[in-house]
Image (tube, grey):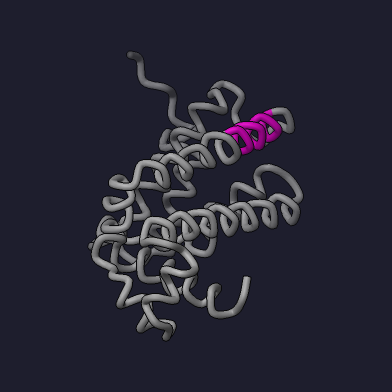
Amino acid sequence: MNAKKEAVLEAGKRLFLEHGILQTSMEQIAEAVPVSKMTIYNYYQSKEGLLDHVVDRMIEELMSIYRDVMEQARDPLEALTIFYRDQEKFSVHVSQKFVTDLAKFPEQMEKLMQFNQKYLVPDFELLIFKGQQLGQIRKDISPQVLVAFMTFIKEFTARSEWYNGLGSINAVSEQLMTIMYYGIIQKDDPPHPT
């Protein structure tokens, strides 16, 4: 890919993620590079064509980050810890507008969902299963339920307004990780009858 086309892709990605797809015009992308609007259309044919390439880039970046962590981690628990502790580094920063707008582009939304279902979910389930076999993760909870729980927490905490009034992001993240790793039941207390 030539440098100008790459610059258009990166500018489009940044503006789409920050401001939303519908709120970002081709003129704004052209000004950010800078190139003519016609140049963008020559490269990507339409705003949706550019968005399609942006989604492909997001998938490539997520897969690269995921592979790096999996290669660097000594074991499943370390991999999960890295993903959780450094989630800011590993997540693509998207505005709520981008997420809302993406729903209006079903092909691109489906592409992201397929990537998640085809690669990330099964790989995380396998990671949890390996952690269970090594005695690092409880065996009484299915990997599928744990992945669903982790996905829910990640999606919920990705909204910055959620942190308002709770303290620093680092302190909140540390407490959420403690809950995930150790639960909320004090170990030396006898269980309550149900």
The structure residue drawn at horizontal position 41% and vertical position 37%, both measured from the top left corner, is 184
Which residue is painted at 39% across and 75% down in the image? 38
Q: Range of the magenta residues?
A: 122-132
Magenta: predominant secondary structure element?
A: helix
Residue at x 42% of width, y 33% of height: 185
Choose top left, top right, bottom left or bottom right for residue 142: top right
Please say whether residue 128 is one of the residues in the magenta stretch. Answer: yes
Query: How far from the left and from the top, in percent, is residue 23?
Result: 24, 65
Q: Nearer the viewer, residue 107 or 173?
A: 107
Please state which of residues 184 and 66 is positioned toward the viewer in this rendering: 66
**On screen, residue 11 above or below 128:** below
User: Could you tell me if residue 49 is visible in this image?
Assistant: yes
Is 170 positioned to the left or the right of 159 in the image? right
Q: Quadrant of the N terminus?
A: bottom right
Decide whether residue 186 is among the magenta residues.
no
Would residue 166 be seen by someone viewing this image from the given angle? no
Q: Position of residue 147 (x, y in %)?
A: 51, 34
Say left or right for 188 vs 165.
Answer: right
Q: Position of residue 43 (x, y in %)?
A: 49, 68
Q: Quadrant of residue 109?
A: top left
Residue 36 placement, left or right of 73 = left
Q: Is residue 99 left or right of residue 70?
A: left
| Image position of 137 with respect to 168: above or below | above
Q: Residue, x 73% and y 45% (percent of image)? A: 75
Quarter occupied by the C terminus: top left
Numbered marks: total: 0
**Who is closer to the viewer here, 142 or 13?**
13
Q: Is residue 150 above or below residue 101?
A: above
Q: What is the x, y in percent for residue 10?
A: 49, 72
